[in-house]
Amino acid sequence: MVPPAEVPPAAATVGWARRFRSSSRLLETALIIIVVGSVAAIGSVHPWAYLPLWGASLALGLLLCGRVLLVRTLRARLGHRPLVLHPPGHPCCSPAWLL
């Protein structure tokens, strides 16, 4: 049996979880922009139209690497437990996170 991981302070855990949620939203938005940009670049006959697409893809890859680091940090802090964040003012529970 695996011993339970020590529960970190709530403020630090919620901060890391909020960064993870923000990076997820940013990653999704960037992916949508890249797909739209790739359609425009493929329709273009100019080779310079592909350069911004490659730059955006590189930035998306770096953002994905940052998200992986956030996931690893949260896993190290929480162990293999689910983390549920409720929006502000949610009537379900008074704490901002549940384990």
Image (cartoon, rainbow, N blue to C red):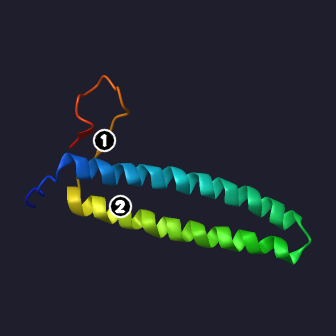
Residue at image position (46%, 50%) is 22
Q: Name the residue under label 2.
A: 71
Res 5 quadrant in image: bottom left
Q: Can residue 21 be seen in this view?
A: yes
Residue at image position (41%, 66%) is 68
Q: Where is residue 64 in the image (x, y as percent from the top left)?
A: 49, 65
Q: In this view, does 24 lie to the left or right of 59?
A: left
Q: Where is residue 32 in the image (x, y as percent from the top left)?
A: 66, 53
- Secondary element under disc 2, as helix, strand or loop, is helix
- Secondary element under disc 1, as helix, strand or loop, is strand
- Amino acid bearing label 1: Val
Q: How far apart are marks 2 and 1 (CA)?
A: 14 Å
Q: Which badge, 2 or 1, is on the more N-terminal residue?
A: 2
Q: In which quarter of the image is the N terminus?
A: bottom left
Q: Position of residue 81 (x, y in %)?
A: 23, 51
- Amino acid bearing label 2: Val
Q: Is residue 21 left or right of residue 50?
A: left
Res 98 quadrant in image: top left
Residue at image position (21%, 55%) is 78
Q: Can residue 79 be seen in this view?
A: no
> Which residue is farthest right?
45
Q: Name the residue under label 1.
A: 84
Q: How many marks?
A: 2
Q: Is residue 11 left or right of residue 53?
A: left
Q: In which quarter of the image is the C terminus?
A: top left
Residue at image position (54%, 54%) is 26
